Image (cartoon, helix red, strand yellow):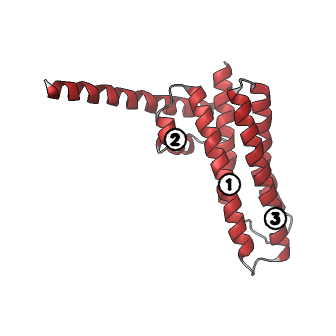
Amino acid sequence: MKNSHISCLLFFYLLLVSATSDLIQKSCYEASKGNPANVKLDFCVSGFQGNPKAKAAYGVADLVLVSIETAIANATAIGSKISKLLDNKSVGMFARNCLKDCSELYSLAGSSLETGLDAFQAVDYGTANAEISAALDAPVTCEDQFKEKNGLVSPLTKENNNFRQLTAIPLAFMKMVQQ
């Protein structure tokens, strides 16, 4: 008798895990199809599969929240990386100024994402979309600054590319929620 209860619980747990995995897979597929320049399917799926909040998602709206929170955490992590790069005394003045600007950009992006998260939770999709879209400027502007000096390579290219995708994902998911 006890084994049959355990078997039932295991069955329902596996069913729930499968449904959540399908939600993530389907949502990421739709996001990548709708915005292939900014959302890569593999990046999207892998970003959610290790996230316990994403695994507990019941619908795309839950994934919007998780994706915004992930982007906020990423903006903070990039800010920390920039601080470490600025601690390096061998960084030249032009690169140092670029990094300082990038730090400000990511701080503003984090604030925009927080405002976007609050707006989404208040079902103010217009404000949420505008605020999250504003955060998309940070990686582009940061990367472009380094290109202004010949031969200077951005030490944040990977981070900028990842943040761009992490910020595009909730925008794509919000479109799905609104349909």
Q: Give the residue at mark 2.
A: 48
Which label sits on residue 76?
Answer: 1
> The residue under label 3 is which amino acid type?
Lys
Q: Distance between the residues labelled 2 and 3?
A: 31 Å
* Residue sitting at the far top: 179
* Residue sitting at the far bottom: 90
Q: Where is residue 7 in the image (x, y as percent from the top left)?
A: 21, 28
Q: What element carries label 3?
A: helix
Tag 1 or tag 3, which sits nearer the N-term? 1
* Residue sitting at the far left: 1
Give the quadrant of the C terminus.
top right
> The residue under label 1 is which amino acid type?
Thr
Tag 3 or tag 2, which sits nearer the N-term? 2
Residue at 74% of width from left, 30% of height from top? Answer: 119
> The residue under label 2 is which amino acid type?
Phe
Q: Name which quarter of the figure residue 83 lies in.
A: bottom right
Residue at 56% of width from left, 34% of height from top? Answer: 28
- Give the crowd class for mark 1: few <14, some 14-19, many >=20 residues within 10 Å: some
* Residue sitting at the far front: 2
**Please, is residue 86 above or below residue 108 in the view?**
below
Residue at 54% of width from left, 45% of height from top? Answer: 47
Q: Give the residue at mark 3.
A: 100
Give the quadrant of the N terminus.
top left
